[in-house]
Amino acid sequence: MAAQGGRWRRFSEQRAKQLQRQVQVSRCVQTSNHPLFSCAQQYRGMTGTGGSTAAGLCSRCHERDPLRRSTAPAAPQLRRGVQTLQQDIEALRASVLEVFRACRDHLQDGLSEMVAAVQRAQLCHQALLAWQSKAGHLERSLQEVNARYELETQKRKVLHNRLVELKGNIRVHCRIRPLLPFDKELDDAASRDSSMPAGVVHAVDDETILVKCDRPAHALINKTYNFERVYGPAESQHVVFGDVCPLLTSLLDGYNVCILAYGQTGCGKSYTMLGPHSEEQRVPARGPHSDLGILPRAAGELFRLISENPSRSLKVDVSIVEVYNNNIFDLLAKEHRTAVSGPKLEAPTTKAAKQEVSPPTRQPVHSAEDFVALAAGSLRLRAQLATQVHARSSRSHLIITATLTTAPTCSSPGKRPSDRQSHGPPLEGRPPCGRASPGSPGAQEPTEQVHAKLQLVDLAGSECAGVSGVTGSALRETSFINRSLAALADVLGALSERRGHIPYRNSQLTHFLQDVLGDAKLLVILCVSPSRKHVAETLRCLGLGARVRQVQRGQAGGGSPASRRPR
Ligand SMILES: Nc1ncnc2c1ncn2[C@@H]1O[C@H](COP(=O)(O)OP(=O)(O)OP(=O)(O)O)[C@@H](O)[C@H]1O
């Protein structure tokens, strides 16, 4: 037991020593940790302050919760918006880049094109210089050619007009129209004998016409006539105009020209002068047409010739009249355009009865189309009638006059152009060109010089009343037509016999044509039917033509003494 107690005592002592050591250690630790403790104290204090601050912040966070909660749903949307914006910015950047690259490429292309263009321009410039020098050479040679041409033109004019004069200032051509269906209808029973030829008039050659007709109970007819030109039934309008054309050259050279179609009714005068006409209206065809008559072709040629020499500045005025029942009607008179006849006129003349003259309306035309349109408009007013010979027989003589004048120039005081120069009668409503006005005898006025006149005359057809079957007023018309044609034949006969007195005043027709018949290049185109039925009229017509051929006159005249001389 004692041992045990010793052990306890020893153990207790050891234990006490241990505890004492631990107390010492803890005291040492306590001493060395004191600053730490004080620091810890400070931190604890700070932690306390931070905790309260955190608590404050927490409470403020809690205060902002409603705001956070309200904005929270918009946040993803905003985020998506931002993402979209970023994508757009990316795309924009990419396209700007692309545009930039394209612009750069274009600029480079443009630049290289510009360089090429400049090179080409340089080449062109060099070529231009070469051409300019060539043009200079050509211009000089053109001037030489022009000078030679002018010289040759003068020679040609002299030769041309000498040739026309040698051929005669009155020429007679004869045209045989083809047999037409209505010829057969007209033929009498005897002539329907199939052994007899339907046509009795033949063109033997270019200058000879033969009428050969053997009818029962009639003497045999076998006659030939010679004219400057004979056209067979198959000859075209183009060929006929080919022989008329040189007269237009003479017209431009200053000669008056008259082309006159003469013949029996229905034998092709209007066809020759105006061309084929519609069934409704007897008007010349317009535009390109192989059957165009002399009027549209002459109008075209006239303006072509004028355009060849614009420096002359020739002006064309047209007047259109018809002689109906021995009265002259102005088909261009405005106030009577719709009536069959215009106001009655006295025939203009250059002789003593000058004061009585009432001039026809003169309308300026500036092209062939104007000319033909004007004629077409006025021809609708021309008198016509259906007869047994011709369904659209003209009952009047038609006279279309184209007056060529030169531009007005100042005349010396008191100087008056001749009657011919002032183109016969003055235009209505103003004093005649070239005459001093009454109040200023010494005043200089521009004068309009008549260069030359072209007259196209489509005569009414001679007819036998028995054959045409007309009665009443139509018979009266026929009598006027035949009388005026007889007067024309008398005038031409008197001219051919060089009689002292020419009976111009026996009819308005010859009175109106007086200037031309006495003093112009006159072409008479005899139009004849080939039909046996009309052989008597055909022989009369050819007889007149043969008489006209005898006419020998002096030189044809023109618009002015100067212009009469071939230039
Ligand atoms: N050379 C021709 N070729 C074809 N047809 C023609 C020819 N000549 C005349 N004709 C025709 O004959 C008919 C009579 O001709 P046109 O009207 O020209 O006669 P005209 O002599 O003027 O008659 P009128 O004096 O009665 O007016 C017309 O239908 C015309 O088309």
Image: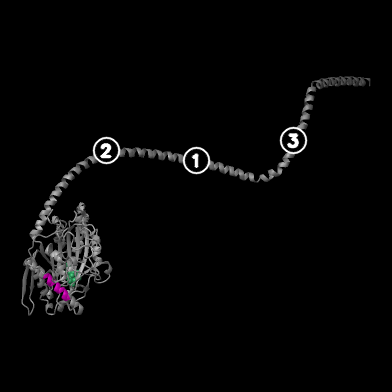
Question: Does label 1 or label 2 sit earlier along the sequence?
Answer: 1
Q: Amino acid at mark 3?
A: Ala
Please give the residue where the numbered disc 2 appears in the rendered image: 126
Question: Does label 1 or label 3 sit earlier along the sequence?
Answer: 3
Q: Amino acid at mark 1?
A: Ala
**What residue span does the magenta drawing correspond to?**
478-489
Question: Does the stretch in magenta take in 298?
Answer: no
Name the element at disc 1.
helix
The picture places residue 265, in percent across and down from the top left corner, at 16, 72
| Quarter of the image where one finds residue 425 | bottom left
**Most foreground residue, 308 or 320:** 320
The picture places residue 526, in percent across and down from the top left corner, at 13, 68
Q: Is residue 220 left or right of residue 132?
A: left
| Quarter of the image where one finds residue 211 | bottom left
Name the element at disc 2.
helix
| Residue 184 visible in the snapshot | no
Question: Does label 3 or label 2 sit earlier along the sequence?
Answer: 3
Please give the residue where the numbered disc 1 appears in the rendered image: 94
Q: Circle 3: is it few (<14), some (14-19), or many (20+) Cα within 10 Å?
A: some
Q: Residue at x 73, y 39 (%)?
A: 60
Q: Circle 1: is it few (<14), some (14-19), or many (20+) Cα within 10 Å?
A: few
Q: Residue at x 46, y 39 (%)?
A: 100
| Colouring mode (rainbow / by chain / secondary structure / one colour) | one colour
Please give the residue where the numbered disc 3 appears in the rendered image: 54
Q: CA distance from mark 1 to mark 2?
A: 48 Å
